[in-house]
Image: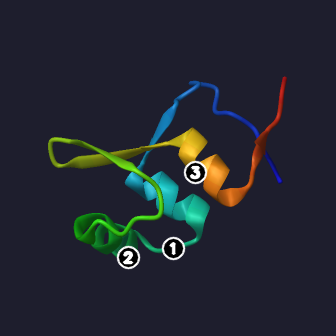
Amino acid sequence: MQLRGKTTGARTVTLSEAATQLGIGLSLAYDLAHDGDFPVRLIRLGRRYRCSQADLDALLGATVAQP
């Protein structure tokens, strides 16, 4: 599977974006994050969650398309 990077070049994504990539709902994503069971490492910034796009790519077995 190949993914194209965003034009912003973001290295982290929101929990909502991660949930979409994983094919799960946002409620489940927050439940997993709260319980410490989200499948990739999360970064907590105040009340917000972020995760590394590279970690998601590794979990999903994706390769990044080169421009």
Q: Nearer the viewer, mark 3 or mark 2?
A: 3
Up the image or down, 16 lies above or below 6; here it is: below
Secondary structure found at label 1: loop
Please name the residue that numbered disc 1 is placed on.
24
User: Residue 24: percent from the left, percent from the top?
Assistant: 51, 73
Residue that label 3 marks: 56
- Looking at the picture, tell me which residue is in the foreground, 18 or 41: 41
Which mark identifies residue 13?
none
Question: Where residue 26 sits: x, y (%)?
Answer: 39, 69
Q: Nearer the viewer, mark 1 or mark 3?
A: 3
**Residue ID at (30%, 49%):** 49
Circle 2 residue? 28
| Image side of residue 44 versus residue 24, left or right | left
Q: Is residue 46 above or below residue 11?
A: below
Q: Residue furthest left?
A: 46
Q: Residues within 10 Å of mark 2 (few under 14, many from 20)?
A: few
Structural distance between the alpha carbons of marks 1 and 3: 13 Å
Quarter of the picture holding the C terminus: top right
Left or right? Give the position of 51 relative to 47. Answer: right
| Callout 1 amino acid | Ile
Q: Residues within 10 Å of mark 3 (few under 14, many from 20)?
A: some
Q: Amino acid at mark 3?
A: Leu
Quadrant in which residue 31 is drawn: bottom left
Would you say 46 lies left or right of 63 here? left
- Label whose residue precedes the other's in the sequence (3 or 2): 2
Q: Given contact means CB atoms under 8 Å apart, are the residues at marks 1 and 3 in contact? A: no
Question: Regarding mark 2 in the picture, which secondary structure is present there?
Answer: helix
Label 3: element kind:
helix
Q: Label 3 vs label 2: CA separation?
A: 17 Å
Contact (Cβ within 8 Å) of mark 1 with mark 2: yes
Mark nearer the N terminus (1 vs 3): 1
For disc 1, the neighbor class at 10 Å (few under 14, some 14 to 19, many from 20) is few
